[in-house]
Amino acid sequence: MPTAEQYYTEIAKLRNNVYVAGKKVDRHDHMFEKSMSVIRRTFNAVDDPELQPLVVAQSEVDRSEINRFTNTHGSIQDLLNEQEMTRKLCWKSGNCIQRCIGTDALTAVGVVSRKIDEAKVTEYHKNFLKFLKHFLENDPVGNAGQTDIKVNGSKRSHEQKDPSPYLRMVEKRSDGIAVRGAKAHNTTGPYAEKIKVLPRRALINEEGIIGRSPSPVQGTRNG
């Protein structure tokens, strides 16, 4: 399993697209130090005798040992173990442990993609499993972009006069889709390796969008 030092090294390799108050800052800027030190605990916990039984899990794909923060929940016990792991890590750090929503989003996409494939002739779950394999093997820190930028709260996203603040598909390609828009309150965005994008509400046909992105993908901006 990757170490905290490897995580720090990988973050340094990402394209610098982080802005604070309109100014471009480094991903290792001092303002992120405390938050990244909390992320460090999630990697170091695999060697903590007290936490190891909770933090180290078995992959749902090949049963290999993985960090639970990359795991999808396959049973009630998985959920209980994650809850206990989160409580203990939060108590030890005195902070939100920050990786929870990335894990929960991974499970949610797995469940929803399977249900869509069962109802329609699609391969969303097959695509998800490819991404999951990569996620399990590399143990990246995941972020979930869910909260929309609010404009006119009385209208749905596709009814807005200016749709640009909302995440939307602008092009469909053979290898996926191109999107534009924004998400808010992505706390770990500047120091996450993968960003999963989710809708904040039950969507209709004109609005559906879900996906994932490497944090430094061309055209994205954390700020």
Image (cartoon, rainbow, N blue to C red):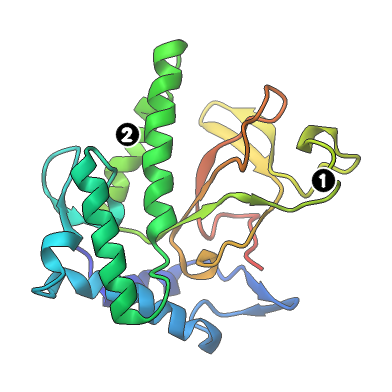
Q: Earlier in the sequence, mark 1 or mark 2?
A: 2
Asked whether residue 223 is in view, the answer is yes
Q: Secondary structure at mark 2?
A: helix
Residue position for label 1 = 153
Q: Is residue 169 left or right of residue 89?
A: right
Residue in front for this viewpoint, 84 or 47: 84
Amino acid at the residue labelled 2: Leu
Does 10 appear above or below 133?
A: below
Q: Can you tell which quarter of the image residue 223 is in?
A: bottom right
1 vs 2, front mark: 1
Q: Can you tell which quarter of the image residue 86 is in?
A: bottom left
Residue position for label 2 = 129
Residue 52 point in image, percent of width and height = 13, 66
Residue 92 point in image, percent of width and height = 28, 80
Residue in front for this viewpoint, 145 or 50: 50
Q: Which residue is at 55% across, 43% downward?
A: 198
Q: Residues within 10 Å of mark 2 (few under 14, many from 20)?
A: some
Q: Is residue 32 left or right of residue 111?
A: right
Does 30 appear above or below 151?
A: below
